Amino acid sequence: MKIITSVRKMQAWADQRRSEGRCIALVPTMGALHAGHDALVRTALSSADDVVVSIFVNPTQFGPQEDFNAYPRYLDEDVEILGKLSSRLTVFAPGVGEMYPADIEADRISVDVGDMSRYLCGKFRQGHFEGVATVVLKLFHACRPHVAVFGLKDAQQFVILSRLVRDMLLDVRMVGVPTVRAADGLAFSSRNACLSPGQRKAAVVVSQAVHGAEEAIKEGEQRSEALVEIMRSILRREDDARVQYADVVDADTLQPIKEILPGQHVLAAVAVYFGGTRLIDSVFTQAPADQGIEKHDEES
Ligand code: PAF
């Protein structure tokens, strides 16, 4: 499998493939690949001729208190996993100097994501989504993909990056892959490995909470306060679970909602600590259409 580490070589490779009429899909990752990434790569393989998997632990999306140095780096193992998947894969694994030529402190231009970073995870991770949007824009320029594949588990990231593509007129088709879950419902994440056996068992409440909210929305609950209480009450079943947030927001703007409108697309999301390990989960769902209006239409 081809491994490219320089931006110039990556661009030359992509230009060559494009000139041959081949469609390129990009799967941006920070490595430490797991079953969730496997689903992203498989989706990419079915959407394009060539797939680039980028492996880059991006320093600008980690806050000062966060674990940039401790973040797992398993490049050899990741390359081995990918090598077994398909011969149509190329790995792009640049160093920090390639992605931030003037150094991370000295690079002056970055992407401002506006108030979309004020809600959910953004409230607790200052500068995180600016770092994500900046590095993804750079990865798009380096890899020149037609299609970009992301996991819907990082729901806020997906919404913000979809807006980046739309607002910056980028010619990239965004594909979101549904969250891959263990048999008990826990979403796959590199962080699950940090849970003790007891915490791992207890962590099932995280997915139960967001699915509880989804069910209530489908049954017609419109009050965000009631939905938040449903999620919190499920999370309270486990003493070890420390809730950072439980929220229901508009799925396109990420703005908080008081009362869901009929037919509105919403995102119910939580972030929960088990010891020092922070887990996130969320569901995109749509409120039922206004029954009254439908009935009226049928009658007329
Ligand atoms: O989701 C991730 O792993 C990262 O945020 C991404 C999109 C690769 C950007 O560094």
Image: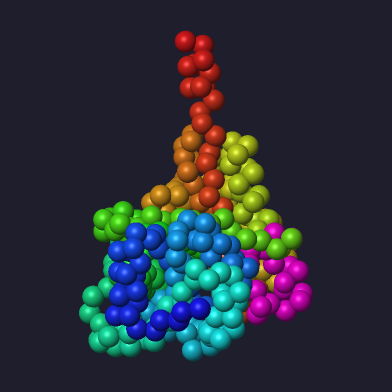
Magenta stretch: give its range. 184-203
From the viewer's perspective, is 272 left or right of 132?
right
How many labels sit on residues? 0
Residue farthest toward the top in the current orientation of the protein: 300
From the viewer's perspective, is 212 left or right of 122?
right
From the viewer's perspective, is 40 left or right of 100?
right
Residue at left offset 37%, top offset 86%: 96
Q: Say whether residue 31 is visible.
A: yes
Residue at left offset 61%, top offset 54%: 210
Q: Which of the 4 quarters of the picture holds residue 80?
A: bottom right
The answer to whether 266 is drawn above or below residue 137 in the figure is: above
Q: Which of the 4 quarters of the picture holds residue 60?
A: bottom left
Where residue 198 appears, x then y in whole percent? 77, 74
**Which one is nearer the viewer's eye here, 89 or 237?**
89
**Which one is nearer the viewer's eye here, 60 or 208?**
60
**Which one is nearer the viewer's eye here, 91 or 188?**
91
Color theme of the render = rainbow
Residue at left offset 41%, top offset 81%: 4
The answer to whether 7 is drawn above or below residue 171 in the figure is: below
Q: Say whether residue 189 is visible.
A: no
Where residue 214 appears, x then y in whole percent? 60, 47
Residue at left offset 39%, top offset 59%: 23
Q: Is residue 125 magenta?
A: no
Residue farthest toward the front in the current orientation of the protein: 20
Where residue 105 appears, x then y in whole percent? 29, 86
Where residue 1 appears, x then y in whole percent? 50, 78
Q: Which of the 4 quarters of the picture holds residue 254?
A: bottom left
Residue farthest toward the left in the current orientation of the protein: 108
